[in-house]
Image: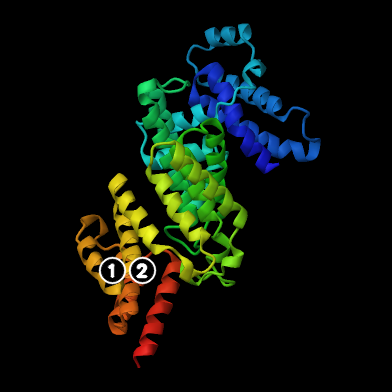
Amino acid sequence: MNTLLRDLAPQVLGALVRRYGDFDLCEDAVQEALLAAATQWPSQGMPDNPKGWLITTASRRRIELWRAESARRRREEHVATLAPPDPEPVAAVDDTLTLLMLCCHPSLTPASQVALALRAVGGLTTAEIARAFLVPESTVAQRISRAKQRIKASGARFRPPAPEEYGQRVAAVLNVLYLIFTEGHTASSGEELQRVDLTAEALRLARQLHTRLPAEGEVSGLLALMLLTEARRDARTDEDGSLVPLSDQDRSRWDRDRISEGTELVTRALSTAPVGPYQLQAAIAAVHGQATRAEDTDWREIAGLYELLATVAPGPMVTLNRVVAVAEVDGAEAGLRELAAAAEDPALAGHHRVDAVRAHLLERAGDLASAEQAYRRAAVRTLSVPERRYLEARARACAARTV
């Protein structure tokens, strides 16, 4: 039932906002309707038309909220009497994309966009979002409240963006989904390496977006990237939850169906649409996915793709990943030289991944004492408990080999 409610949440909210226009009241009303359904349906049975039931319930609650908050109660009660809620004619319209774009309004910060998208389109509760990102529930509630206020203050209407804004808004939607997926794939802090609820939600929303925009190359690229990355999820940790690096993973545990689907998606996108960063990242993931053994990985192709990615969408993490690929092609010493230059970027100052890459390359080069020190520095700097345990284990292994 929870899956059904989350699937219906954006459709119900879209129907209400399309009819009434006020996002904040409608979003509150839909959340109360979802809560009512979760409470009543298990004991009373699911209605024949769950979506219609939710729309009707949310519409009634929205009018109650409207009346309670309005200073002009008599006029609005009269209007409500003249226009009773009957949104069924618009219920068949799929407003998911429009709703996502509204949640990604340019006046909002990325953190607010993520919170609002998960709440309004993903159907997650405030408590669920707070647990996923390890922040207080009050913080998420404030982000959502401020986001709705900013949308209202901006005068944004519930409609697709103007043609000149379309590309920017789709890019914002993709960025939000990427942020959600990335946090779920490798949690930035906490006891768990992965948060499956977030990766699953990002993947579900990406599929919906691809259904609406099948010809958008970057939409296909992001969905492919998620599929190819998620295909390796079961092999990324061992039985006690410890991190397993890509080179050591049991590839028989990779989901070959997802790899095939993701590879087909990105191959088609690269041949039919302008090349973008999500497609290039997906292409790199596809090269990894096609290697049945770590030693079969085509690192030269990966290094070339990172060169292109660094041109299309340069960034500190792209730089670090390119260093690793160069080391695989040209040797650890070449990688260390590249890393020395990359580490001068202020954006990488103090980042644990710089020390982690340096430690890996020093270990490969045979400088175990220096590798141990770099692993320990990286372990201190990361906020992820599984990553810290892995880095500390590598440091101990290097120390044992130097004795």
Query: Extreme bottom residue here?
Result: 403
Mark 1 closeness class: few <14, some 14–19, many ≥20 residues within 10 Å: many
Work out whether 152 lies above or below 277. above
Q: Residue at x 29, y 57 (%)?
A: 319
Residue 42 x/y as whole percent:
77, 40
Image marks 1 and 2: residues in contact by CB distance under 8 Å: yes
Q: In the rendering, at what x and y percent does residue 74 appear?
A: 55, 8
* Amino acid type at mark 1: Gly
Q: Position of residue 229 (x, y in %)?
A: 50, 55
Secondary structure of the residue carrying numbered label 2: helix
Residue placed furthest toward the right: 44
Residue in view at x 68 percent, y 38 percent: 4
Residue kind at label 2, given as amino acid type: Glu
Q: Is 258 on the left or on the right of 147, as rendered?
A: right
**Is residue 135 in view from this perspective?**
no
Q: Secondary structure at mark 1?
A: helix
The quarter of the picture where residue 171 lies is top left
In screen coordinates, is 197 left or right of 360? right
Q: Give the CA distance from mark 1 to mark 2.
A: 8 Å
Above or below 214: residue 240: below
137 or 170, which is in the foreground?
170
Q: Quadrant of the C terminus?
A: bottom left
- 128 displayed left or right of 392: right
Image location of residue 325, percent across then percent down: 35, 63
Query: Of the numbered discs in the image, which one, if any, rests on residue 328?
Result: 2
Tell me the residue that label 1 is attached to. Answer: 335
Q: Is residue 383 above or below residue 65?
A: below
Mark 2 surroundings within 10 Å by alpha-carbon count, few (fewer than 14), some (14 through 19), many (20 or more): some
